[in-house]
Image (cartoon, rainbow, N blue to C red):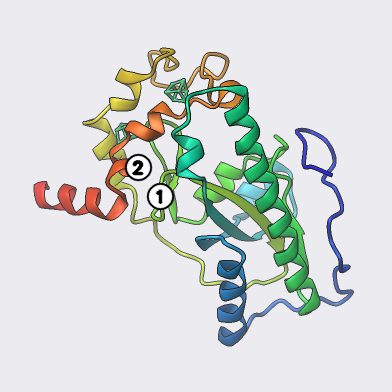
Amino acid sequence: MRIRYHQPIPNFYNFENPTSPLNSISDDFLNELKQFILDNDFIGVSYSKLSDDFKKEWEIDWDNILILKYVMSEEILKMDPSKEKTKLEDMEFQEFAHKTFEIADFLRKNNFKADLIHPLDDRVSLRSIAMQSNDCIITRSNMCMFKEGLNLGFFMIDTSIENFPFKKENDMLWVKDFCSTCGVCIDRCPENAFDDDEKIKRKVCTAHKEGCSKCVLLCPFFKRGYDKVKKRYDRKN
Ligand code: SF4
Ligand code: SF4
């Protein structure tokens, strides 16, 4: 069984949601949860608290989101675009989807409500949810970048936990300024997939059809990493 575009999310859970879920997590259990997530090969976690306006805009009624981030394999990313590459990317995606169900089960077993948010369903934008975490930024190449890397995939769990350490301010906004002086992704895109307003032309970009990753591979954030780019930016500004 696989997760597919616009198909109902499969039931990979081994446990039901608790009938009276807890809504507060202790520091000790939060640490245990984070360790369990890292043990499942994710690189880190972020948390989004969705505002009332956001919920209204997307017509949803849940608001505490656990974001699980994984590093997309560099080996696959560096392959030339091909059907084989997209197949490998999908296999990696499905593998982490299964791990996300295990993490939801871990929460359910410990009396928290936990439901995977469908990662391939346009009813709510995962990138918009990610931005509500104040822990990522959309780059000029239209990637959702967290500090752990530009080549991250992520899954999300909607949970009853209301006291995650939600970030109130985004300290990555400087990236917009950095991108405004760079533009390598736009200049070197083999498909000219950016319009005059620098928005990606989805029908032209071949990332999903053939697995093009050129704009990621050329980006300083991928080549040097977030911290090094930030240090250099701070020295100059
Ligand atoms: S290549 Fe340059 S402009 Fe494009 S996302 Fe990376 S830093 Fe920003
Ligand atoms: S993935 Fe490839 S085609 Fe799409 S914007 Fe990036 S470089 Fe251009």
Taking the spot 21% from the left edge, 31% from the top edge, the residue there is 181
The reply to whether residue 57 is visible in this rendering is no
For mark 1, what is the residue? 149
According to the picture, the residue beneath numbered tag 2 turns out to be 222
**The disc labelled 2 sits on which kind of residue?**
Phe
Query: In what element is the residue under mark 1?
Result: loop
In the image, taking residue 223 as reference, residue 70 lies left or right, namely right
State if disc 1 and disc 2 touch (CB < 8 Å). Answer: yes
Q: Residues within 10 Å of mark 1 (few under 14, many from 20)?
A: many
Question: Residue lying furthest left in this view?
Answer: 236
Horizontal and vertical percent position of residue 31: 55, 80
In front of the other: 165 or 5: 5
Tag 2 secondary structure: helix
What residue is shown at x 60% (from left), y 37% (from top)?
89
The N terminus appears in which quarter of the rendering?
top right
Relative height, residue 201 to residue 99 (above, below): above
